Amino acid sequence: MCAHTSQIQTVEKLEEHYKVKLSDESKRELFDVPHYHIIGFTHAQLLIIPQEKSGVLAAATWGIAPEDKSVDELKAYYKEAAKFGGGINARSEKAFDHFLYKQSIFTKRCIIPVSAFFEPHDHKGNKYPFVFKPKDKDFISLAGIYTRIGNKVTFAILTKEASPLFAKIHNKKNRQPVMLTAEQEKNWLSNDLNQDEVEAILNQDYDEAQLDYYPVSQDLFHPQTNSDVKTILEKVEYEELEVNY
């Protein structure tokens, strides 16, 4: 499950990298503030690149919700949806038959640019967070789907069965986010893909040699501690961990 991310680059960097433009200029200052730890369960606002307007960066609420809900109903919906994950992630294996996901998978796919994301490693019942970030780039492009509810957009990150690397780290859930290469980014937002072509992107292996990963502070999982700080991205050594990294 991918419920913790980091986005520390400026909007201008995002625009340059993805060849897009912020859709609402009044939000530039808001999204220029670096966020070292973003928690999905808070239903935070992130910038996404939506299939319907693939030339823009649009603000979206993390936690996909059905389009038959109103904006006023979202708070109550998220409270109820917390029982099954709050719509933070969407299992790619269910993308074509889940009552909600199937409404978006053909026409409302998106890219979620992040600077890094975090996954938990379980060791003797204790959770140790690991960060994953790109070695040579500023961003990782995560695949997602979204809905439009009034003037709001809600989204989820697509996940799939863990690769051997992610199974070693995320060793309880054995899941990982769907990450896109530069070539896949363009294809993912294409309006011409059929089911087989979408599935091929979802199932293609990502070159994990392009990723750095290591353990970080357990403050990441402490709700009473402010973990949205620069140091949360720093490596922490735990003598008790048996996993190689």
Image: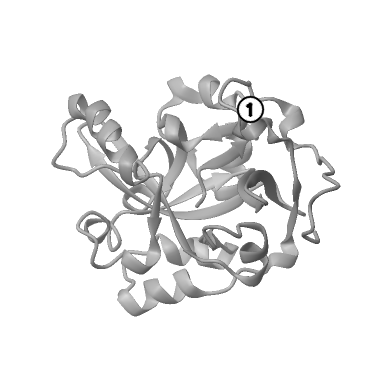
Residue 159 in percent (x, y) is at 46, 59
Residue projecting furthest to the bottom: 196
Report which quarter residue 163 is drawn in: bottom right
208 up-or-down from 229: above or below: below
Residue 237 in percent (x, y) is at 85, 43
Residue in the picture at 56% in, 58% down: 172
Mark count: 1
Residue 83 vs residue 165, the one in the foreground: 83
Residue 166 vs residue 26, the one in the foreground: 166
Q: Residues within 10 Å of mark 1 (few under 14, many from 20)?
A: some
Colour option used: one colour
Q: Is residue 115 left or right of residue 89?
A: right
Residue 219 in percent (x, y) is at 67, 30
Q: Is residue 164 left or right of residue 175?
A: right
Residue in the picture at 23% in, 28% down: 76
Residue in the picture at 56% in, 49% down: 18
Q: Can I make out residue 22 in this image?
A: no
Residue in the picture at 16% in, 36% down: 69
Report which quarter residue 38 is drawn in: top right
Residue 73 vs residue 238, the one in the foreground: 238
Residue 58 in percent (x, y) is at 41, 37
Q: Which residue is mark 1?
A: 34
Residue projecting furthest to the front: 124
> As shown in the figure, which amino acid type bears the numbered disc 1?
Pro
Q: Give the structural element (helix, strand or loop) at label 1.
A: loop
Report which quarter residue 179 is drawn in: bottom right
67 up-or-down from 37: above or below: below
Q: Can I make out residue 159 in this image?
A: yes
Residue 162 vs residue 71, the one in the foreground: 162
Quadrant location of the C terminus? bottom right
